[in-house]
Amino acid sequence: MASGEGFLTDEQREMLKIASLNVDNLSSSPKTLSSSPRSPSMLLSEHQLKVPAAGKAPTAGIAVRHVRRSHSGKFVRVKKDGGGGKGTWGKLLDTGGESHIDRNDPNYDSGEEPYQLVGATISDPLDEYKKAVVSIIEEYFSTGDVEVATSDLRELGSREYHPYFIKRLVSMAMDRHDKEKEMASVLLSALYADVISPSQIRDGFVILLESADDLAVDILDAVDILALFIARAVVDDILPPAFLTRAKKTLPESSKGFQVLKTAEKSYLSAPHHAELVERRWGGSTHITVEEVKKKIADLLREYVENGDAFEACRCIRELGVSFFHHEVVKRALILAMEIRTAELLILKLLKEASEEGLISSSQMVKGFARLTESLDDLALDIPSAKTLFQSLVAKAISEGWLDASFLKPSSEDRQVLAKDKKLIQYKEEIVTIIHEYFLSDDIPELIRSLEDLGMPEFNPIFLKKLITLAMDRKNREKEMASVLLSALHIEIFSTEDIVNGFVILLESAEDTALDILDASNELALFLARAVIDDVLVPLNLEEISGKLPPNCSGSETVHMARSLIAARHAGERILRCWGGGTGWAVEDAKDKIQKLLEEYESGGVVSEACQCIRDLGMPFFNHEVVKKALVMAMEKKNDRMLDLLQECFNEGLITINQMTKGFTRIKDGLDDLALDIPNAKEKFSSYVEYACKKGWLQACFG
């Protein structure tokens, strides 16, 4: 038989026939196959395969152990015992019991595949959020574009997960250079309130504090860096100072988080000029203080009015790098247009170009106009036609298309004001004049007469708001005068409800006030605390005020700060002097005066004269000391005449139930020591408590 390509020789055919006859024996016993001295593969490998090429003489014999011909005609190395390789048919005699399914087989049937349970991955929304914010943060660190980062986070949604954004932003910045740390702090300030609520900012820092131990494993100075981030947040007014005190209570003293808070408090926030030091700690490469920004804005606007170069002015605005603060540019530009009438056209041109270029966003434009609306009453004192001019500017801005027409739609607060017609507007104008005159003359009786002449007691809360707002924007002298006036008004014409409602209105607008007054939150807390110390309000009124505010607002935080101030040791003395005013006496001087007036009364003095002396002390927050010393003296002298004095003081409202209860409480707390000198002190005190309860001196919760 002629040999051709692809055919076996006679000798090879004979060997294949022998192998086929032995298949049954080999398959019945795997051991036989493996132990057979002459398996079919061995038989074939002992011979030479001569495969003639087409048109060529046969090649020399080639040893073919573990070599097979592929479908393409190439020789390929195969696995031991003829295992399959690329371009091979598998083992020559695959007689094992297992069946192999080849998905490339034309006769492949998917039904022959064995069943398998496939686990489906369930995506966690929080995990997806965390992955997404990493890319936002990375991009921000690369570009430094606050506006883009803010927009991306807002578009991401999932507002409930924003505390985790805070954690991720700060933790990523902690492991980078000072530039990124500074950028992270700037972004937090930009996001505060507009995108991330104050409560979420706090929650984010709490999560960071709780994970401080883990952060310290990878970042050697994690405690110091995180302490600086918290100090910076306090300086930037996105965390209240009271945050440190509250957070300490939730952390173990042995934890790194507790160390972070101690470091922030002692190393950064207690140092002289700490605000400036903290702001400059990371080089301040991307951040300047609010006051510096305001000054730069005022300078560039005045320079623009002089040279009229809108392109240069836009460049300067862009270089400030505070897109989240562009509402200040709008507000100051509009005020400048009112002050310098010849500059109006230039100002309108600049704002229009800034809007068309996308330099000042529509939301920032509206916010700037809105801020000016709120301060028009004060502005009218310097520019009488301010309201008319402002309305003209609004109309032109809307007609030219760079101010949203929705600006003219009144907000809910505006609708409430409009509903009360021009009476309230007239009242506001009158009281601004009255308050300014008071700051000049310090004449409380005259102010009270002026308010009585207005005859609008229903607007007393509005007066309180205006009084404190105007005082906050002035020096400590005016702040002290406002607190003193508040005490006088409470005695003369203001009810406690008026005071409470006035503070509620103030705190509801605290976030807007903070735009113009950097330390507004702390100052409002001091005004609240001072009102309690002066007995204008009682501590329970703070709960009432807090209950009338929206949850998690900055006003609620201010109330918490006021509580913390009041709860501190020697709070009365410190708060009384918070504006540098007060009686000027030391506490020891006051105690000495109280002791002397009580001794004089006990030796035969007149009740009315003793009451007048107590009143002349001018320290109502310290009247609990009068109660305490009077009770001790009654025990020592075995003379209950002191109770008559306390009764008269209570009847006149000179000593309040709050101060009376506090005085009795101080006696109760030191009763064991007192009993060493006065053996029957406990029995006498019990009789005094019983008497006081019958007379209604004490709060129901006493004891």
Image: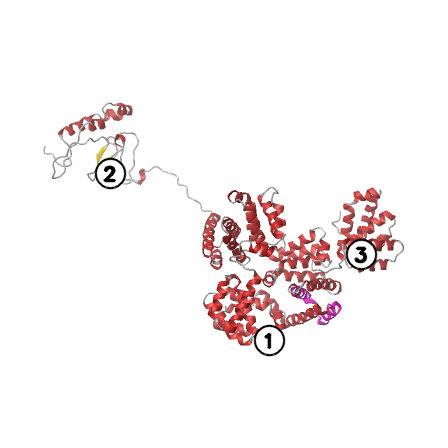
Using the image, tell me which numbered label, if any, was put on residue 87: 2
- Disc 1: which residue: 385
Foreground pick, 29 / 142: 142
Q: Residues within 10 Å of mark 2 (few under 14, many from 20)?
A: some
> Of discs 1 and 3, which sits in the foreground?
1
Q: Which amino acid type is shown beneath numbered disc 2?
A: Gly
**Magenta span includes 638:** no
Q: Which residues are magenta?
A: 442-469
Look at discs 3 and 2 and give the one toward the viewer.
2
Camera-side residue: 245 or 611? 245
Residue at 62% x, 72% y: name it: 380
* CA distance separating discs 1 and 3: 53 Å
Percent x, y of residue 4: 12, 36
Q: Position of residue 30 (x, y in %)?
A: 28, 25
Q: In percent of the image, x 85 and y 47: which residue is there?
A: 635
Q: Residue 226 in the image: x percent, y percent? A: 55, 49
State the residue in front, 615 or 693. Answer: 615
